[in-house]
Image (cartoon, grey):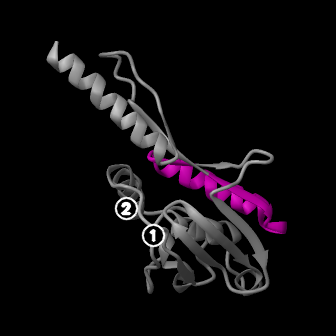
Amino acid sequence: MYSRVFVRGCTAALTAALTLAGGQAYAASPGSGDQLLAARVVTYDAGASAEFKAAVDRGAAIWNESVDSVELRPAAAGQRANIRILADNGWPRALTTSLGNGTVYIGRQAVNEGYDTVRISAHELGHILGLPDRKPGPCTSLMSGSSAGVACTNPYPDAAEKAEVEGNFDAALARPASAARTTVIVD
């Protein structure tokens, strides 16, 4: 009896924490083997990403294929997005306000120099998901960014990058919300 009440209380507390963190949760039937928690949903608005919209959508899909603790979804009409994605003539960069929130600039300068638009998109979204640059680095590391050279078109995070994003979002559920911080990452 005590264990059943304890489990219900823990499930309720975890559901409340996930909801406060902007995520979704659902209860599974006991013994069903279903996951108790769904991924935290982070929305993005690529409406101002101009010619890069398809690359942005593909970059988000790559992250969705790669990690379980967070899901990137296009924002619904009229919904305020966690991530704004803009095209400009500068170098690609991310302005992170907090984990899962910020602005991404898909800069035409890197594209004009020959860098792959899907790799740029996935890389910049990686910053919003809490990853730093890892330069210099090999093409197998998404966060090596431009240091891998223009021939590198790999848009996939490596195992360590995937694990770090999983840890970032798992840890975000375990700690109280803190004051927003702003980090600018220029690649």
Residue 182 screen position, x and y as percent? 52, 76
Q: Nearer the viewer, residue 20 or 57?
A: 20
Residue type, label 1: Leu
Left or right of 87 in this view: 24: left
Residue 23 screen position, x and y as percent? 50, 43
Q: Is residue 185 above or below residue 127?
A: below
Q: Nearer the viewer, residue 40 or 164?
A: 40
Element type at marker 2? Answer: helix
Residue 82 screen position, x and y as percent? 62, 57
Q: Which residues are magenta?
A: 43-71
Residue 24 among magenta residues: no
Disc 2 packing (10 Å; few <14; some 14–19; many ≥20) = some
Q: Residue at x 36, y 29 (%)?
A: 12
Q: Earlier in the sequence, mark 1 or mark 2?
A: 1
Left or right of 103 in this view: 21: left
Q: Quadrant of the N terminus?
A: top left
Name which quarter of the figure residue 119 lies in.
Answer: bottom right
Q: Is residue 106 above or below residue 35?
A: below
Q: Residue at x 75, y 71 (%)?
A: 86
Q: Nearer the viewer, residue 61 or 22?
A: 22
Query: Would you say the residues marked 1 and 2 are in contact, meaning their CB atoms lie under 8 Å apart?
Result: yes
Residue 69 among magenta residues: yes
Residue type, label 2: Glu
Residue 68 screen position, x and y as percent? 45, 45
Q: Residue at x 21, y 24 (%)?
A: 6
Disc number for residue 164: 2
Disc 1 packing (10 Å; few <14; some 14–19; many ≥20) = some
Residue placed farthest to the top in the image? 1
Q: Which residue is mark 1?
A: 131
